[in-house]
Every structure is written in C-alpha cells, then in structure tokens.
Amino acid sequence: MTALRVTEIFHSIQGESTWAGLPCVFVRLTGCPLRCRWCDTAYAFYGGTKMEESEILTQVASFGCSLVEVTGGEPLAQPECRSLLRRLAGERYTVLLETSGALPIHDVDARVRIILDLKCPDSGEEQSNSWQNLADLKPIDEVKFVVATRRDYEWAREVARDHDLPARHAVILSPVWGEMDPARLARWVLTDGVPFRVQVQLQKVLFGPDTRGV
Ligand code: SF4
C-alpha cells in the first residue's frame, strides 16, 4: 500500500495559476529540500500525518470538487506522489501539481497540469533549478516566477526569452507578498511589453496573508 506524509487537505480558492478563482481541493504534502528565503509554507517542512493513498482520495472526494492541486512543501520529494497524481487523474479530477522545478517531472502522469515554480536569484535557490524540466513541460503546463526584486524580474524575463516560454506556456509573475510592490512589477511588464501574467496570491487577498487551510 502507498502512504504519504500529509500536512493538510483543505478546500479553498485557487490563487496562484491560470486556474485562480476556482474552488479547489488542496493536498499539501510534507517536506521540502529547498529553503526559499521568502517561503510562506515553512510549516510544511516537517511533521505531517502519514496517510494511505486511499485515505487521501476519500478525503479529497468528500469536498465534491472537481479541481485538485497537489502542493507542498515540494510534493515530488516524496516518490509516492507520482502514484497519488496518477490515481487522482484516473478518478477524472482536473489535477494541478505545484512543484519547485528542482526535481524531475518527466515521469509525472501526462494528465496532470504542472505549475513549475522556477526559482529566481533572490529566492536563494536559483542553483536548485533543473533546466531539463523546461524541456519536459507539456503545452498544458505553466511556468511561474516568484519575484522579489528587479534583479529577479530581469532574470525571469531573460529565462522566458531564452527558452521561448510565452510561445509555449502561460508565464506567471507573482510578487513576493509584502516585499515586491505588485503595481511596480505590473509597470515593468507594461513597459517591456512582455506577455506575462502578473498575479497576486488571491488566497491571501481573500483570507489574509497568514491564514492556513482555507
Ligand atoms: S520550494 Fe516551496 S515549500 Fe520549498 S522552500 Fe521554496 S517556497 Fe517553500
């Protein structure tokens, strides 16, 4: 039987992808090998509860919601995550996976929509990016850059250009909450005329920046 360590399962509003605004069930897996400077889910680094895959599926089903996101921590840090994603996709949910981009995605079920969170320099984790992942993305996948500074913005702009990302994927810029002024970021995008989606973390706007599990 497959078991995973889970920090929380909850029903909320999608806040950080092109699916933003929709009701969604979140499965937050425990553990992450990275330490982004601005991480807002450090509570998922340790602890959690060991749950059988079937138990997770039952809890997800109890919300009666067709959109499910597996997130973390870094969900792919638990090898069993791939099996969970396959089972969820097999149950006909629309399945999103939010991953740091540090771990391989080539063996993730092709029905799963990946939100690849590339790490900009001022996250302190730029060296963790696995560039092979960009080649392994499918057209339905999205790329997100969490931007803390002008340096991060310019880095994201260059990576997107060098890999021709906007032609193949939705590219999202998300300002670090409380650190990067969203309007400033939006002006840079407008000035440069780049086809990026500037997106604030909707769940924090709706429920407050420190609220968990809503
Ligand atoms: S990858 Fe995600 S969970 Fe891990 S430290 Fe970075 S922001 Fe936090």
Image (cartoon, rainbow, N blue to C red):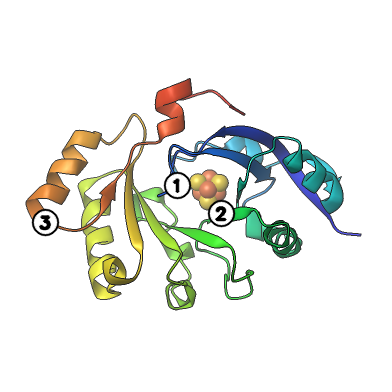
Label 3 Cα neighbours within 10 Å, binned few <14 / some 14-19 / many ≥20? few
Question: At x 32% / y 58%, what residue is drawn?
Answer: 171
Which amino acid type is shown beneath numbered disc 1? Trp
Left or right of 203 in this view: 8: right
Is the residue 39 above or below the residue 88 in the image?
above
CA gap, disc 3 and disc 2: 29 Å
CA gap, disc 2 and disc 1: 9 Å
- Residue assigned mark 1: 19
Q: Quadrant of the N terminus?
A: bottom right
* Secondary structure beneath label 3: loop
Q: Earlier in the sequence, mark 3 or mark 2?
A: 2
CA gap, disc 1 and disc 3: 23 Å
- Is any part of residue 47 visible from this angle? no
Q: Check whether the beta carbons of the residues at disc 2 and disc 1 lie within 8 A of each other.
A: yes
Q: Quadrant of the C terminus?
A: top right
Numbered badge on residue 49: none
Question: At x 23% / y 70%, what residue is drawn?
Answer: 161
* Along the line of sight, the residue nearer the viewer: 150 or 137: 137
- Is any part of residue 60 visible from this angle? yes
Residue 99 at x, y percent in the picture: 54, 56
